[in-house]
Image (tube, rainbow, N blue to C red):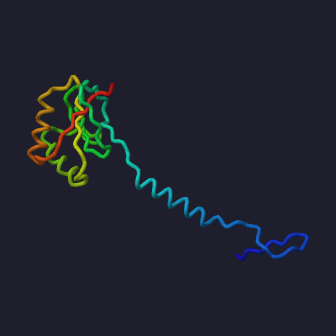
C-alpha cells in the first residue's frame, strides 16, 4: 500500500507534512537497552536479618556474593535455603559466575556463631585469598 503525499489546499509545493519518528524510536530503544544492561541491581538475602552493631563500617560494592544466616541459623544464598553441606558447592558456582565479587555474610544477632564460623572455614578452604565481609547495622 503506497502512501499518498498530502498537498495543501492552496496548492503549495508537494512537501510531506509527516515527521518520520523511526530514527528517534531506534535511539530510544538503544538507550533503554544500554541502561538495562549496565544497571547494577542490589541483592537482598530474601529473609529478614537483624544485624549486629559494630564500630568499623566499610562499604562493599553492590555486586557481591551474599550469604544470609537467619535467627534459626538457617543459611540462605540468593533467596534459597541451603544446607550446610552444600555451601562449598554453591560457593564454587557463584565464584565461577562472579570471580571478582566480594563475599558478604549477613548473620542475624540471634543466630549461632558456630554456623558463621563453619561458613567462613568452608569459604577459606575453597579460596583462601577471599576476604569475607560481615554485614552490620548502619547508625
User: Residue at the location (70% across, 66% down)?
Assistant: 19
Q: Position of residue 66 (x, y in %)?
A: 26, 41
User: Residue at the location (46% across, 54% down)?
Assistant: 35
Marker count (numbered): 0
Q: Is residue 115 above or below residue 2?
A: above
Q: Is residue 134 above or below residue 89?
A: above
Which corner quadrant holds the N terminus? bottom right
Q: Position of residue 101 (x, y in %)?
A: 25, 48
Horizontal relation, residue 107 to residue 42: left or right:
left
Horizontal relation, residue 87 to residue 39: left or right:
left
Q: Position of residue 70 (x, y in %)?
A: 24, 29
Q: Is residue 53 above or below residue 65?
A: above
| Residue 120 picture quarter | top left
User: Residue at the location (87% across, 73% down)?
Assistant: 12
Question: Considering depth in this image, is 101 or 93 the residue closer to the camera?
Answer: 101
| Residue 121 picture quarter | top left
User: Residue at the location (59% across, 62% down)?
Assistant: 25
Return the residue found at the far right: 10
Q: Position of residue 113 (x, y in %)?
A: 14, 27
Which corner quadrant holds the C terminus? top left
Amino acid at each position: 500500500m503506497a502512501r499518498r503525499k498530502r498537498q495543501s489546499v492552496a496548492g503549495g509545493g508537494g512537501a510531506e507534512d509527516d515527521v518520520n519518528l523511526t530514527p528517534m524510536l531506534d535511539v530510544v530503544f538503544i538507550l533503554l537497552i544500554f541502561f538495562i544492561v549496565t544497571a547494577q541491581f542490589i541483592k537482598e538475602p530474601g529473609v529478614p536479618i537483624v544485624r549486629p552493631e559494630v564500630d568499623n563500617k566499610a562499604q562493599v560494592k553492590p555486586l557481591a556474593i551474599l550469604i544470609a544466616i537467619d535467627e534459626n541459623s538457617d543459611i540462605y544464598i540468593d533467596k534459597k535455603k541451603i544446607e550446610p553441606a552444600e555451601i562449598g558447592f554453591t560457593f564454587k558456582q557463584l565464584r565461577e559466575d562472579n570471580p571478582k565479587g566480594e563475599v558478604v555474610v549477613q548473620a542475624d544477632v540471634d543466630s549461632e556463631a558456630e554456623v558463621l564460623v563453619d561458613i567462613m572455614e568452608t569459604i577459606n578452604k575453597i579460596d583462601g585469598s577471599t576476604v569475607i565481609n560481615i554485614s552490620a547495622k548502619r547508625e
